[in-house]
Amino acid sequence: MNSSIFITLLSLAIVGALAYFAAVGFRGSGKNEELPANLTKYKSDDELETKHLDKSLSWAVLIASLLTIMIPLYYLGEDSRQESFVEEFEDVSVERGHHLYEEFGCGNCHGVDGGGGAASYVEKRSGVKVTWAAPAINNVFYRYDDSEVKYWLIYGRANSPMPAWGLEGGGPMNDGQLEDLIDYLHSFQVEQSFELGTIESSINSSLLRLENSALQVENEIINQKLLIEEIKAGPAKLPILQEAVDKISALLEKDTGIDSDEDGLYDSVEIEISEYSATIADVVGLSVLNLNPEEEESTPSRKDASVARGYLSQLNSQLINTGILVEGQEKFLNEGLAGLKFLETALEQRLWEVSFEDIAESTFGGNIDDAKRAVGLFNAYCARCHTAGYSAGVAYTKKIGSGGLGPALRGGRANIQFKSRGDLIDFIINGSVNGKGYGVNGVGGGKMPGFGAVLPESDIALVIDYLRGMEPDA
């Protein structure tokens, strides 16, 4: 657009606007027009200072009186309102924490209810895949406070299946999510009376583990030998698996035939799959399928088509795993043989064993029952941190008190660190506090839990006497 035309149009617009405002300003200025309220004379002083003022003051007194009554009433209910807000906030936080617990699979290791469980882990000394004992967390706040639990969540536990969950430790959760998770953990803590009621079963379980330890290691040796044989058989097994996957896939894709039981599989397919599964059962290690063309559910509560697809899925998984084994056969075989040697050496050395008779004689005046209870308590409540390899299983357990996450307690350490039996008992009852000294020269990191809420002092004293009476290593 030409600039002169633009200026002309703009000038006309400004003139038009001014004319409009002038017209609006003069509107109503005629004698017959009613004046607006702001141009009329208001009430006289007499009127304002009598009826109008009295009416305004009356309303003011009424409103002030209502406020005088309402403000205290509101105040009286403020505590309950704040409490309800806190409860609502906590409930929402617990709900978010529950979602996090499920989303990140905490229950897969620690149990759906936090009662403890297990996790798959490759033990570092042996290279053997083990079932790592994951502790119960439905009693964790009897031993740790919130900040200590948060520490473990942030950084995890190195050299164990417990990963870091906090951003600072390299995990996926921010501080708000960690707080929600902690609130959820609080929501399913067991009663203290229940926790105290598990002492005897915990002791008995740890003693039974010692009693059956050799048998457990022998079973692991058998399993390790089977693993080695599986690695060796890989090259011969791989083509059979490939043929089986191809054949079963082709049968399931068949699109013509008779389906007597209307289960989605043709009769001829059910017969062929059943017969073929019998010919490869010994090689692939899967059960023979017995699909009946006249029954929709040859296996109770499972459709034949679902059973057949599940069988193919198992074959596919075996094909992938066997392919990996064959590709790295030499590496896996060497690792398997090294693991077998470790297990056989462990069975020969039996480092997990203790002599109740010697302990009774040296520490408990010959009382075998006290010796057994002391060892049972230590293994049930202390060994996970203070005995190397304990959580990985019997075969990986070193000498009792040999140290792990926590320091070794052998070599008279209990007597060196604490001047008196009472000092050590107090420390076990209360645990460590981050930055606070303990014993002769210890500095707490908040990682040592307090056991005063889960064990009576009499049991703690038994463990202390056992540690203080432990002979120094040669």
Image: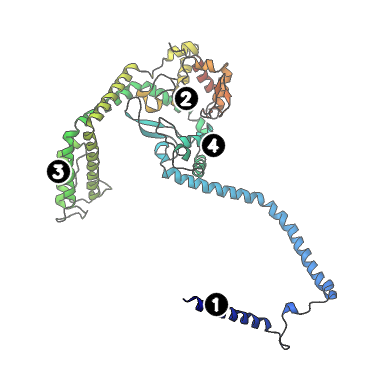
Most extreme residue toward the bottom is 32
Q: Which numbered disc, 4 or 1, marks the residue closer to the eye?
A: 1
Closer to the camera in the image, 192 or 123: 123
| Residue beneath disc 4 | 146
- The kind of secondary structure element at disc 4 is helix
| Sequence-first tag of 4 and 3 | 4
Q: Which of pointers 1 and 2 lies earlier in the amino acid sequence?
A: 1
- Mark in front: 3 vs 2: 2
**What is the number of the mark on residue 144?**
none
Identify the amino acid type marked 4: Asp
Q: Please tell me which of labels 3 and 1 falls first in the chain.
A: 1
- If the image is split into quadrants, where does the C terminus sit? top left
**Residue identified by numbered label 3:** 275
> Mark 2 — residue?
406
Please name which of the two marks, 1 or 2, marks the residue nearer to the observer. Answer: 1
Q: Local crowd at mark 2 within 10 Å, few (<14), some, or many (≥20)?
A: some
Query: Looking at numbered disc 3 in the image, what kind of residue is underneath it?
Result: Glu
